[in-house]
Image (tube, rainbow, N blue to C red):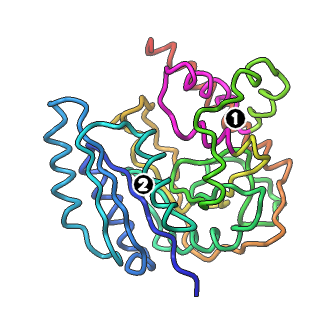
């Protein structure tokens, strides 16, 4: 029997969201058999110290897992540095990992699904990440599987393997050549029209994102993200409480589905489904631009 993947949970200054996330995880059937690593980021300024201290008082009493290990940063690292450093450390000890932030609700079989997927597709060179979330795309009626491949990595309830995470280029050293290659930029944007603009902003220091660099590393290695047709994750952080600006929305994973998911070894990318995936992110990107103009940000 293979060992279960450790869970890595990142938190900051939202004790209420964190408590909901942990309670949801504790209800998972594999929780008591899984190790939990918690990374608590430090406050940016004195006004956040109280909320961070409340978070740390709560995590000190968390139980229901095989083992709980807590890392409390004395300074504010920011989410990108925290995730890259934290996931890299855990993957230096284990071959696979499951990662969440402090605003995710999960089904009771989320951990089972993730472990099954991580075991089933560990040796697939064209799959770099798995997730329990799926955006509300229009899945073609004749699509025969309960999983699909998409040219994008999800940052919501996701997992990966040490040997694939190790191939990530966090400096994006080929950015200059990508910037001058329109054909390659268009290929990158098959996962959503927002990808290239996000990467450009990250490289300019406008945004601090690990996820766009992870998605680009996946693209650079001709790999996909694995998604379920029905979500096992729901995001509760799109209420304006996060550190990055988000528009309030109730569409993210409203419908979560319990139940076993078949995992065919020969799962292939489906052109119609990828078009539906791309269309969802195109519309989301256009809506975000419209809202940014409306709100003057």
- Give the quarter of the image for residue 120: bottom right
- Residue under the point 59% across and 60% down: 162
- Residue under the point 15% across and 31% down: 46
Is residue 82 found left or right of 224 in the rendered image?
left
Percent position of residue 255, x then y = 53, 58
Task: Work out whether 17 lies above or below 125.
Answer: above
Is residue 148 found left or right of 164 in the rendered image?
right
Task: Work out whether 107 lies above or below 71.
Answer: below
Q: CA distance from mark 2 to mark 1?
A: 22 Å
The question of residue 148 being in magenta is answered with: no
Crowd band around label 1 with a 10 angstrom C-alpha radius: few (<14), some (14–19), many (20+): many
Q: Which residues are magenta?
A: 191-217
- Helix, strand or loop at disc 2? strand
| Main SS class of the magenta portion in the image | helix
Percent position of residue 72, x then y = 26, 51
Is residue 123 found left or right of 248 in the rendered image?
right
- Give the quarter of the image for residue 71: bottom left
The question of residue 211 being in magenta is answered with: yes
Does label 2 or label 1 sit earlier along the sequence?
2
Q: Which residue is mark 2?
A: 104
- Asked whether disc 2 touches disc 1, contact meaning CB atoms under 8 Å apart, the reply is no
Q: In the picture, which quadrant includes the N terminus?
A: bottom right
Q: Which residue is mark 1?
A: 192
- The residue lying toward the viewer, choosing from 226 and 169, is 169
Percent position of residue 99, x then y = 48, 57
- Report the disc number at residue 26: none
Q: In the picture, which quadrant includes the C terminus?
A: top left
């Amino acid at each position: 029997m293979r060992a279960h993947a450790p869970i890595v949970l990142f938190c900051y200054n939202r004790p209420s969201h964190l408590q909901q996330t942990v309670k949801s995880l504790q209800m998972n059937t594999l929780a008591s058999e899984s190790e939990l690593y918690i990374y608590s980021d430090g406050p940016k300024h004195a006004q956040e110290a109280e909320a961070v201290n409340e978070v740390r008082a709560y995590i000190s009493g968390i139980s229901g897992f095989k083992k709980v290990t807590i890392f409390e940063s004395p300074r504010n690292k920011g989410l990108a540095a925290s995730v890259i450093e934290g996931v890299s450390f855990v993957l230096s000890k284990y071959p696979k990992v499951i990662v969440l932030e402090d605003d995710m609700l999960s089904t009771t079989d989320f951990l089972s699904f993730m472990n099954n997927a991580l075991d089933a597709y560990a040796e697939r060179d064209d799959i770099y990440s798995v997730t329990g979330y799926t955006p509300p795309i229009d899945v073609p009626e004749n699509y025969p599987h309960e999983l699909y491949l998409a040219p994008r990595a999800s940052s919501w309830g996701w997992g990966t393997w040490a040997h694939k995470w190790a191939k990530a280029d966090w400096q994006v050293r080929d950015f200059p050549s990508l910037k001058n290659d329109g054909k390659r930029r268009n290929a990158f944007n098959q996962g959503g029209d927002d990808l290239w603009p996000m990467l450009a902003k990250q490289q300019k220091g406008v945004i601090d994102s690990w996820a766009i660099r992870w998605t680009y590393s996946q693209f650079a290695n001709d790999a996909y993200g694995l998604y379920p047709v029905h979500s096992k994750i729901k995001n509760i952080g799109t209420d304006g409480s996060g550190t990055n600006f988000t528009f309030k929305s109730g569409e993210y994973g409203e419908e979560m589905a319990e139940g076993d998911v078949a995992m065919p070894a020969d799962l292939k990318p489906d052109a119609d489904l990828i078009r539906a995936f791309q269309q969802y992110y195109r519309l989301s990107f256009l809506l975000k631009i419209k809202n940014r103009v409306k709100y003057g940000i």
